[in-house]
Image: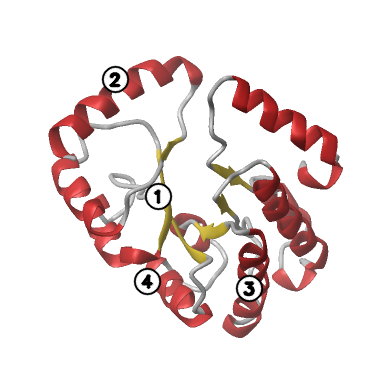
Amino acid sequence: MAWSPSLKAEERVKIRRVADSYGLEIASLSSDWAWGYSTYCPKLKYWQRGMEVLKEDICLAKDLGAKAILIHFGTSQAQSWQQTKDMIKELAEEGEMRGVRVGFEGGIWARIGLGGLKELCQMVDEVGSKWFGVYEHCYWPRGTTQPHEEINLVGERIVCLHSGRIDTKNIDYGLMLKALKKYYDWYWVFEVEMEEAEENIKLWKEVTAKYW
């Protein structure tokens, strides 16, 4: 269920005040309602309302002080490259108006039928806006490309870095951070359960102290 359309201005202000009271910055948001929406709207030609909500999400990001947002179309299928580019251009323009960078995750992009990460990079280049890029999340070792390889492919198109918990058994963080240093110096967003958060922070500090 989408959150932003029902969240009134005073509620947005309250959320930001609560975050500020704890010394927390709301750096990035994610439009995860799109997974459910794509179940009911399996093709992008049905996304008129979905586009309105994504734009409202971008506005919410601005109201909460976030500088980036992960957007996607769930599993809805694209009708054509041009149609999808036109939709993304609209979102990039909304991001520019709000001062929020809009990012599409490669693993989710692959679900809409227009190729993989290379094609997403091509889309970013064709849209040609600094407000649209890749919300980088490498799926190694589930995927076929290691983190440093993905980062070198995406390059300066990175809007935000996203991952699961630190995994020193399978990921060479020396190579990953060496690549990352060339293109990116902002937040690293972890998708972990609360009971794993403390241990993940400890591992993150160890990895960054050693390689950053």
Amino acid identity at mark 2:
Lys
The circle drawn on residue 165 is: none
- Three-letter residue code for mark 4: Lys
Number of other residues with Cα within 10 Å of mark 1, as a class: few under 14, some 14 to 19, many 20 or more: many
Q: Which residue is mark 3?
A: 78
Tell me the quarter of the image containing the N terminus: top right
Q: Mark 1 vs mark 3: which is more N-terminal?
A: 3
Q: CA distance from mark 2 to mark 3?
A: 41 Å
Front: mark 2 or 3: 2
Q: Check disc 3 and give the amino acid type.
A: Ala
Quarter in which the C terminus is drawn: top left
The residue beneath circle 2 is: 202
Residues at marks 4 and 1 touching, judged by CB atoms closer than 8 Å: no
Q: Is residue 40 left or right of residue 151?
A: right
First in sequence, mark 2 or 1: give its number.
Answer: 1
Of callouts 4 and 1, the N-terminal one: 4
Q: Nearer the viewer, residue 13 or 148?
A: 13
